[in-house]
Image (cartoon, grey):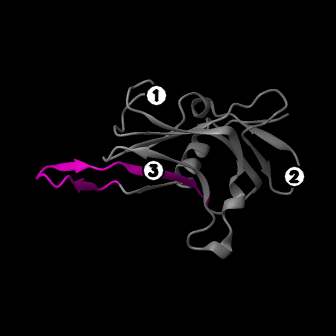
Amino acid sequence: MNTFNNNSKPLTWFMGLLLTAFVAGCSGGGDGGGGATAQPGTLGVSLTDAPACGFDQVNVTVSMVRVHQSDNASENAAGWTDITLNPPRKINLLDLNDPTQAPKFALESLGETPLPAGHYTQLRLVLDRNTGQSLANSVVLENTTDEIALVTPSAVQSGIKLN
Protein backbone atom coordinates (compact mmCIF):
# COMPACT_ATOMS: atom_id res chain seq x y z
CA MET A 1 0.00 0.00 0.00
CA ASN A 2 1.40 3.44 -0.90
CA THR A 3 1.45 6.32 1.53
CA PHE A 4 0.60 9.77 0.24
CA ASN A 5 2.46 12.10 2.59
CA ASN A 6 3.59 15.44 1.32
CA ASN A 7 3.71 16.90 4.85
CA SER A 8 -0.08 17.20 4.53
CA LYS A 9 0.31 20.91 3.62
CA PRO A 10 -1.58 20.53 0.31
CA LEU A 11 -4.36 18.68 2.13
CA THR A 12 -4.53 21.39 4.79
CA TRP A 13 -4.90 24.13 2.17
CA PHE A 14 -7.31 21.98 0.16
CA MET A 15 -9.48 21.36 3.22
CA GLY A 16 -9.29 25.02 4.17
CA LEU A 17 -10.86 25.90 0.86
CA LEU A 18 -13.52 23.24 1.22
CA LEU A 19 -15.09 23.92 4.57
CA THR A 20 -18.02 26.33 4.56
CA ALA A 21 -19.64 27.35 7.80
CA PHE A 22 -22.95 29.07 8.11
CA VAL A 23 -23.89 30.89 11.26
CA ALA A 24 -27.56 31.79 11.49
CA GLY A 25 -29.55 33.52 14.14
CA CYS A 26 -26.67 34.90 16.20
CA SER A 27 -28.14 38.37 16.60
CA GLY A 28 -28.91 39.86 19.95
CA GLY A 29 -32.43 40.55 21.06
CA GLY A 30 -34.06 42.87 23.53
CA ASP A 31 -35.47 41.67 26.81
CA GLY A 32 -38.07 44.44 26.88
CA GLY A 33 -36.63 45.86 30.12
CA GLY A 34 -34.14 48.25 28.60
CA GLY A 35 -31.18 45.84 28.64
CA ALA A 36 -30.19 43.70 25.71
CA THR A 37 -30.11 39.94 26.14
CA ALA A 38 -28.11 38.02 23.57
CA GLN A 39 -30.16 35.26 22.00
CA PRO A 40 -28.47 31.96 21.18
CA GLY A 41 -27.87 31.06 17.58
CA THR A 42 -27.26 27.94 15.56
CA LEU A 43 -24.07 26.98 13.79
CA GLY A 44 -24.56 24.83 10.71
CA VAL A 45 -21.43 23.43 9.05
CA SER A 46 -21.32 22.14 5.49
CA LEU A 47 -18.51 20.89 3.29
CA THR A 48 -18.04 21.61 -0.41
CA ASP A 49 -15.25 21.18 -2.92
CA ALA A 50 -13.79 22.94 -5.91
CA PRO A 51 -12.89 20.79 -8.93
CA ALA A 52 -9.48 19.09 -8.71
CA CYS A 53 -7.31 17.71 -11.49
CA GLY A 54 -5.40 14.46 -11.27
CA PHE A 55 -7.68 12.58 -8.87
CA ASP A 56 -10.60 10.21 -9.29
CA GLN A 57 -11.32 10.27 -5.53
CA VAL A 58 -10.31 12.39 -2.56
CA ASN A 59 -11.75 10.72 0.54
CA VAL A 60 -11.84 12.18 4.03
CA THR A 61 -13.61 10.73 7.05
CA VAL A 62 -14.89 13.51 9.29
CA SER A 63 -15.43 12.59 12.94
CA MET A 64 -15.91 16.03 14.48
CA VAL A 65 -16.10 19.75 13.79
CA ARG A 66 -14.97 22.09 16.58
CA VAL A 67 -15.58 25.84 16.88
CA HIS A 68 -14.08 28.43 19.22
CA GLN A 69 -14.28 32.20 19.67
CA SER A 70 -10.49 32.58 19.89
CA ASP A 71 -8.39 32.03 16.78
CA ASN A 72 -5.40 30.97 18.91
CA ALA A 73 -7.12 28.60 21.37
CA SER A 74 -5.35 25.26 21.69
CA GLU A 75 -7.25 22.00 21.23
CA ASN A 76 -7.33 21.56 25.04
CA ALA A 77 -8.56 25.07 25.87
CA ALA A 78 -11.95 25.63 27.47
CA GLY A 79 -14.76 27.06 25.36
CA TRP A 80 -14.88 24.64 22.42
CA THR A 81 -18.24 23.64 20.97
CA ASP A 82 -18.21 20.33 19.08
CA ILE A 83 -20.35 18.77 16.40
CA THR A 84 -19.66 15.04 16.61
CA LEU A 85 -20.47 12.84 13.62
CA ASN A 86 -21.48 9.46 14.99
CA PRO A 87 -20.53 7.37 13.17
CA PRO A 88 -17.77 9.33 11.41
CA ARG A 89 -18.69 10.04 7.78
CA LYS A 90 -16.42 9.12 4.84
CA ILE A 91 -16.90 11.70 2.08
CA ASN A 92 -15.46 11.68 -1.43
CA LEU A 93 -14.85 15.40 -1.85
CA LEU A 94 -15.02 15.10 -5.61
CA ASP A 95 -18.69 14.17 -5.30
CA LEU A 96 -19.21 17.71 -3.98
CA ASN A 97 -18.22 19.62 -7.09
CA ASP A 98 -21.28 19.06 -9.23
CA PRO A 99 -21.05 21.67 -12.03
CA THR A 100 -24.85 21.67 -12.36
CA GLN A 101 -24.99 23.29 -8.90
CA ALA A 102 -22.68 26.23 -9.79
CA PRO A 103 -21.95 28.63 -8.27
CA LYS A 104 -23.02 26.92 -5.03
CA PHE A 105 -21.88 23.42 -5.98
CA ALA A 106 -23.03 20.57 -3.77
CA LEU A 107 -22.99 20.93 0.01
CA GLU A 108 -22.54 18.05 2.47
CA SER A 109 -24.05 18.98 5.82
CA LEU A 110 -21.86 18.00 8.77
CA GLY A 111 -24.38 19.03 11.39
CA GLU A 112 -25.65 21.84 13.56
CA THR A 113 -25.21 22.94 17.16
CA PRO A 114 -26.63 25.76 19.28
CA LEU A 115 -24.14 28.50 20.21
CA PRO A 116 -24.21 31.56 22.43
CA ALA A 117 -24.26 34.80 20.41
CA GLY A 118 -20.77 35.97 19.58
CA HIS A 119 -17.95 36.12 17.08
CA TYR A 120 -16.38 32.73 16.27
CA THR A 121 -13.02 32.76 14.53
CA GLN A 122 -11.68 29.20 14.58
CA LEU A 123 -12.99 25.95 13.16
CA ARG A 124 -11.20 22.62 13.37
CA LEU A 125 -12.09 19.73 11.13
CA VAL A 126 -11.14 16.50 12.91
CA LEU A 127 -10.59 13.48 10.66
CA ASP A 128 -10.81 9.80 11.56
CA ARG A 129 -7.59 7.78 11.72
CA ASN A 130 -6.46 5.35 9.00
CA THR A 131 -6.28 1.89 10.58
CA GLY A 132 -4.82 -1.30 9.16
CA GLN A 133 -6.44 -2.08 5.82
CA SER A 134 -9.22 0.46 6.31
CA LEU A 135 -8.31 3.81 4.78
CA ALA A 136 -10.40 6.59 6.30
CA ASN A 137 -8.51 9.29 4.37
CA SER A 138 -7.19 8.53 0.92
CA VAL A 139 -6.85 9.53 -2.71
CA VAL A 140 -7.20 7.60 -5.93
CA LEU A 141 -5.09 9.10 -8.69
CA GLU A 142 -6.72 9.69 -12.05
CA ASN A 143 -7.01 6.58 -14.25
CA THR A 144 -5.90 4.22 -11.45
CA THR A 145 -7.70 2.01 -8.97
CA ASP A 146 -5.20 2.00 -6.08
CA GLU A 147 -6.32 3.84 -2.96
CA ILE A 148 -3.38 5.77 -1.47
CA ALA A 149 -3.45 6.67 2.22
CA LEU A 150 -3.38 10.34 3.20
CA VAL A 151 -1.20 10.84 6.24
CA THR A 152 -2.85 13.58 8.28
CA PRO A 153 -1.37 13.44 11.81
CA SER A 154 -2.62 16.81 13.09
CA ALA A 155 -6.02 16.35 11.41
CA VAL A 156 -6.70 13.21 13.46
CA GLN A 157 -5.31 14.63 16.71
CA SER A 158 -6.34 18.27 17.05
CA GLY A 159 -8.02 18.82 13.69
CA ILE A 160 -7.24 20.90 10.64
CA LYS A 161 -7.26 24.45 11.98
CA LEU A 162 -9.26 26.92 9.94
CA ASN A 163 -9.29 30.55 11.12
Cβ atoms at labels 2 and 3 below 8 Å apart: no
Image quadrant holding the C terminus, namely top left
Question: Relative to 36, is 71 above or below?
Answer: above
Residue under the image location 13 percent in, 52 percent down: 33
Residue 90 at x, y percent in the picture: 72, 45
Q: CA distance from mark 2 to mark 3?
A: 39 Å
Q: Which residue is mark 1?
A: 75
The furthest residue to the left: 34
The residue lying toward the viewer, choosing from 77 and 27, is: 27
* Amino acid type for the residue under numbered disc 1: Glu
User: In the rendered structure, which segment of residues is drawn in magenta?
Assistant: 26-49
Residue for badge 2: 144
Q: Position of residue 131 (x, y in %)?
A: 77, 28
Toward the right, the furthest residue is 145
Q: Earlier in the sequence, mark 2 or mark 3?
A: 3
Quadrant of the image occupied by residue 107: bottom right
Residue 52 appearing in the image: no
